[in-house]
Image (spheres, rainbow, N blue to C red):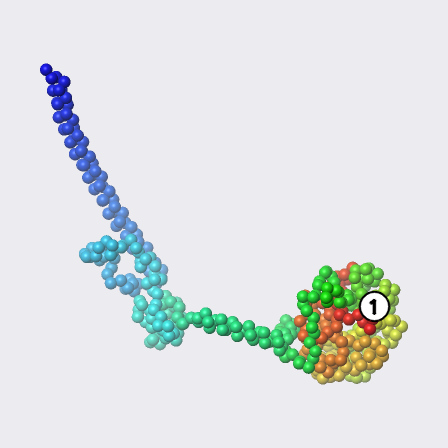
Amino acid sequence: MRLTDDYYEDEKDSSKLFLYMVLFMSVVVLGVTGLVFWMNHEEKSGSNFELAKQQTAERRQAAGISEEQVPMEKSVDSLISGSTLTSDQLNIWDLSALNSVEEVETPKSTKNGTVTNQTTGETIVDGSSNNGSENSAAILAEGKTSVYDMPDKDDEEVAEEEETKEDEEDTNHDTQTLITRADGTEEWVELNENLAKNNYSKSRFVYKNPIMSYYLNGKEASWCGVDISSKQEGVDFKKLKKAGCDFVMIKVGGRGYSSGEIVLDEKLKDYMTGAKNAGLDIGVYFFSQAITEDEVEEEVETLLEAIKDYSVKYPVVIQMQEIEGDIARVDSLDMDSRTELTKLFLSEVEDAGYKPMLYGNKEWLVTKIDLEALAEYDVWLSQEADTPDYPYEFNMWQYEKTGKISGISEETGLNICFVDYAKE
């Protein structure tokens, strides 16, 4: 008997039938699953499209664009149904045209000052519409077209303009000097070619608070000084000397810019004595508001009498200037008159055996007097700056009017001098 073989054959037949049933059921399940997935996909596609369509409509409404203004040959619905285009051609998921109103509106420019709106066909020429009923600003406000288009300048044109501007500035620096007035206004003034220019190098100025120095060939070639009057009540001249001060410019007095009366500075004698005892060199200045030759003579006579008993080795200076925020007596004079009176003052000082000097800020020196007529006299420049931009020769520079230095409790003028007048 072959029991074992008979049993084996029966088992094979039943296993084959079971396998066929499993395969059949698997196909059925897969088919049902695919059908459900396809139905969900179609529903989702329709929902996404309706959402995109709704968002596009909202954007058009916000931009003020009607349905008729959108340049599409067929509506989106017609693309979905009844179209012979393939899915690649439809590419309905690439909604750049629907999602970007700006791209639909972009006008074509003829590059001649004319802009054509692709939506309406309207043309703008020289800032106006072709029918003259609307200007470009109104059209832009309605969102019909983009900004008026003109040809841009090329890089070469821009470079040429920048170069021209730089050349003009360089020319100004060579032939003009900038004046900044007390009120902040500015003016370029032609340089006087007959006046000697200063040859100071900005790189040679060295500031070590509070002292400004100037160096030549690695050696200091300047002297430090202060200018003082009764406004500086507490002055310790020995401390001042120790702080590095070489000289003092002391106010003798002045004429009232309104009253016209001459008044001597109340601290004059104390300061002259104190500076001498501390070993400081002395210079003096007088505030002039003379408007006649007789008044100049009176001022010089008063000055010389006040300093006759002291050793004055540094210059004797005339300070004639305007008064900020008020009217001064010398404002009534023209340039020639101010120049003649200044020259008379300086010549009288020189005749008395002192070194005369002219004081002023850049505006006063360049625009209020004739420097060429006073070229023989030394200049004391007043200009608060890191380095001076005064173009002409000067021998002393007041670089700070309200400085602080050991030996003086109040603010005071700080100066650098390029000449050792005490040894002349």
Q: Who's the residue at 26% across and 50% down the image?
A: 46
Q: At 88% across and 71% down in the image, what residue appears?
A: 310
Amino acid type at circle 1 is Asp
Q: Is residue 59 above or below residue 183?
A: above
> Horizontal and vertical percent for residue 115?
36, 71
Residue lying at the far front in this picture: please name it: 217
- Residue 201 position in % (x across, y down): 68, 69
Location of the C terminus by quadrant is: bottom right
Q: Is residue 73 left or right of residue 132?
A: left
Q: Quadrant of the N terminus?
A: top left
Residue 217, image x and y in percent? 72, 66
Residue 226 position by quadrant: bottom right
Residue 5 at x, y = what percent?
Answer: 13, 20
Q: Which residue corresponds to the image point at 75% horizontal and 64% vertical from the top-left?
A: 219
Is residue 263 in view? yes
Horizontal side of residue 150 vs 277, given as left or right: left
* Residue at horizontal 22 percent and vertical 39 percent from the top: 33
The residue pinned by badge 1 equals 281
Residue 365: quarter of image: bottom right
- The crowding category of the residue bearing disc 1, from other C-alpha atoms within 10 Å (few below 14, some 14 to 19, many at least 20), is many
The image shows residue 66, relative to residue 357, as above or below, that is above
Label 1: which secondary element: strand
- Which of 387 and 202 lies nearest the eye of the viewer? 202
In the image, 269 versus 174, the foreground residue is 174
Q: Quadrant of residue 8?
A: top left
